[in-house]
Amino acid sequence: MICKRVEYKDFRNIKDETVSFSPSTTILYGKNAQGKTNMLEGVYIFAQGKSHRAGRDSELVRFGADSARLTMTYESAGRENTLSLVIEGGRHKIPYKNGIKLDRLSEMIGNFRAVLFSPEHLAIVKAGPSERRAFLDVAISQLRPVYMRTLQRYNTILMQRNALLKSMKQNTSASLISSLEAWSEKLSEYAARVAVVRADYAEKLSELTSELYADMTGKKESVFISYHGTSRIGGDYGDEKRIREIYRRQLTENVEREIMLGSTQYGVHKDDVDIMLNDREAKFFASQGQQRSIVLTLKLAEGEYSKRETGEYPVFLLDDILSELDPARRSYVVSGIKDRQVIITSCDMSVKRRIRGGLSYCVRSGTASLMAGAKE
Ligand SMILES: Nc1ncnc2c1ncn2[C@@H]1O[C@H](COP(=O)(O)OP(=O)(O)OP(=O)(O)O)[C@@H](O)[C@H]1O
Ligand SMILES: [Mg+2]
């Protein structure tokens, strides 16, 4: 997978700029607040369908402009394609593939695959379960578009069930009770589908992550991850019917409590991923450097798994990550990504010395200019 070029129009602080990327390494240098991360964000949005950091799409539109437009030309399996996104403040994003409007954003996901390492991702280890679920969901969605639709359906059912629970605080008529049963049935069906896929992905990722982590630390440290269902499922996710039955039972056994709280207390929206570092829970015991190393190896493993499934590496996007690693871990990362496309942002010109080949740009106030002597 190669991202060849992105045209940015009124996106964040970028008025009108086109950046061509090297098939090996592209470095985006620049002082703080110039637009380096914005340029990466404009690449990653095609993989994830949304920004990794904006809460609302309107944040992506340049101050004072009505809409933003991003167009990416990329190559996958030897074929060149374009994807575009029109972002109108306050409205839905409109996706296009090769100039043709797509009906839904979810149709765009899976065309272009990328793995992003950004400072925000350090939260995967220490923050709450939602960060870890999001990590799995984003990674899986790029490989299995059907999974994303299943998850969206789950969330819609969840919202409807929650609305019903709230209304039942005042009124528990027989018809509401039977409609709650129907929602519980539907929710457990989708919960089981989601849980089985997440658990399977976590298991595959764990193998790759623990290999990579052992390599990175010269076998001094170990990392394992596993899917942790809050329901009493245990570690066995092989039988979807069984999982569905467990979720269904939990939803029906705890109706009174759920009505009192006005929200659904069981299901995959409560699940977590256990990350074990040297046999202890990383969320309590990992140092800052260990957190960074765990996230990096998780992301490298994500790329490795994507390659196994699709036959090609995703594009690796590194947002200001290298400068904060110690030299040994930094050179491990640099050597681990050398035969694939990488786009790196940095404020530190010395990154260039460690990475050979490729293109370097200087990013200033939302523009990018090729640096002298930096051509391939
Ligand atoms: N919608 C927007 N319109 C105009 N400018 C914006 C918009 N959103 C963000 N910005 C500005 O874009 C600038 C660059 O942001 P960006 O995060 O890309 O910086 P950066 O080059 O990565 O800097 P750092 O090295 O500090 O990470 C910031 O000053 C930010 O305020
Ligand atoms: Mg930045």
Image (cartoon, rainbow, N blue to C red):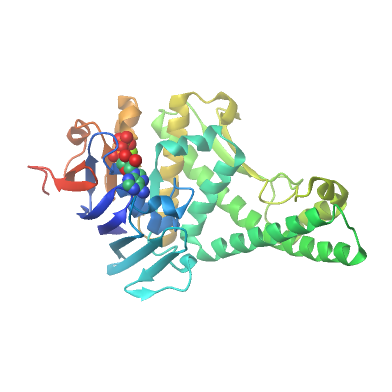
Q: x%, y% of residue 18?
A: 21, 56
Q: x%, y% of residue 38?
A: 32, 46
Q: x%, y% of residue 270?
A: 68, 46
The answer to whether one can see residue 335 in this image is no
When asked about the image quadrant of residue 371, the answer is top left
Viewer-nearest residue: 188 or 372: 372
* Count of picture labels: 0
Residue 55 lies, with reference to residue 187, above or below; the image says: above
| Residue beneath the point at 41% across and 61% down | 88
**Quadrant location, the N terminus:** bottom left
Residue 127 lies, with reference to residue 272, above or below; the image says: above
Residue 70 lies, with reference to residue 278, above or below; the image says: below
| Residue beneath the point at 47% across and 65% down | 105
Q: x%, y% of residue 334?
A: 29, 37
Viewer-nearest residue: 318 or 265: 265
Please identify the residue farthest to the front as the structure is shown.
64
Write down which quadrant ligand 1 falls in.
Answer: top left
